[in-house]
Image (cartoon, rainbow, N blue to C red):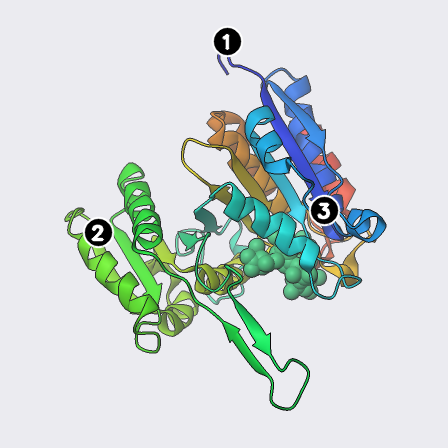
Amino acid sequence: MTPSASLKRIALIPGDGIGSEVTQEARKVLESLATKGSLPLETTTFDWGAEKFLREGVTLPEGALDMLRSEFDAIFIGALGDPRVPSNRHAADILLGIRFGLDLYVNQRPVKLLDARFCPLKNRGERDVNFVVFRENTEGNYVGLGGNFKKGTADEVAIQEDLNTRKGVERILVYAFEHAQRHRLTRICMADKSNALPYGHGLWRRTFEDVRARYPEIEARHVYADTVAMEMVRDPAQFQVIVTSNMLGDILSDLGAALLGGLGLSPSANIHPGKISMFEPVHGSAPAIAGKQVANPMAALLTAGMMIEHLGFPKEAGRIEELVKEALANDRVTPDLGGTLRTREVGDWICGRL
Ligand code: NAD
Ligand code: IPM
Ligand code: MN
């Protein structure tokens, strides 16, 4: 940190279920770094989520996006989703509302194995599982275009459109290539289903051909997404960067999380370069284990690391990753990884080492 580093204002949205438990640990670690003077940061918590929705009928409050844009440097979100809101309307409004509203078109989901003992694949180590998934985050079949006709009858029709724009596809592809170039990576794989979706994913294929031509030094190939899923398990070492559409990226990133030891270890970032960005663990609110202090907070801690790295503090981010690795190596882990520690005990252990 340079003495002149300006204060970073973080909006925390703990959300539902285990979201609030893991966010609490992320907050502890961030505040611990702040107290030690190595991170000029201040957090403000927002109670947006199922409770508020059920109580007040409010999902994303009016003016929220402008407020986030003007008063904060980054957003950290735990998870949203509650069985008492079967439509998941509040999660769509809040989570997708922020992704779309702030145009956070890059969903960066690193798949970096931190401890080989937790990888479910035979004979694979940290060197074999280390790639990043870039998921398009503002288009595809997530945009909510569609409807039902004769809903609830035997003749019901449901339409869910898959929206792909040249601009939207191109910008995520360019981001992935630029990332590869910046990090001296040499291989990119685009995952699509153009064999079944010739219009939408045909656009992905054609745009990919155009963009790859601008980066001749990068080995770029397209692979159908079902094959990518299979190859991620068979030989993950072949991947450095995977770039793909919104829903395929959602699915492949959960598979990626499994290679690390589970969703409790998988961080992510929702980015619009140069503008406010949002950081969230890949996992959801896990209602079945919520409120029991058994959720693994490591994904949230690594997510906090991605956030502070993005804000210009790579050393502090590296420290968080090191300490998560140390906790894994010393079996200071929650039950999902075979341990007995509670959520807050993992956070305490890591804060204690900072
Ligand atoms: P989930 O990620 O909540 O849980 C999937 C499985 O992984 C469950 O067995 C759960 O117990 C386990 N798990 C997840 N995170 C864990 C952690 N940190 N520690 C230990 N175990 C963990 O996915 P789901 O069950 O499909 O979804 C539950 C709700 O969360 C749904 O409403 C869904 O829409 C929502 N969701 C939200 C987000 C988000 O807000 N970013 C992401 C995914 C799912
Ligand atoms: C994720 C989640 C969300 C998504 C859900 C909750 C809408 O699964 O962040 O991975 O599909 O993007
Ligand atoms: Mn998901």
Residue 9 percent coordinates (x, y): 61, 24
Residue behind mark 3: 15
Alpha-carbon span between mark 2 and mark 3: 38 Å
- Image quadrant for the C terminus? top right
Residue 257 percent coordinates (x, y): 53, 58
Quick check: marks 2 and 3 in contact, CB under 8 Å?
Answer: no
Comparing 208 with 301, the one in front is 208
Task: Name the image quarter holding residue 203.
Answer: bottom left
| Amino acid bearing label 2 | Val
Residue 121 percent coordinates (x, y): 49, 66
Residue behind mark 1: 4
The local crowd at label 2, few if under 14, some if 14 to 19, many if 20 or more residues have their Cα within 10 Å, is: some
Q: Is residue 196 left or right of residue 146?
A: left
The local crowd at label 3, few if under 14, some if 14 to 19, many if 20 or more residues have their Cα within 10 Å, is: many
- Against 197, residue 292 (above or below) is above
- Against 328, residue 256 (above or below) is below
Residue 161 seen in render = yes
Comparing 212 with 256, the one in front is 212
Going from the N terminus, do you reach mark 2 or mark 1 first? 1
- Asked whether mark 3 and ligand 1 are closer than 8 Å, the reply comes as yes
Residue behind mark 2: 211
Residue 73 seen in render = no
Task: Give the number of the mark in front: 2 or 1.
Answer: 2
| Amino acid bearing label 3 | Gly
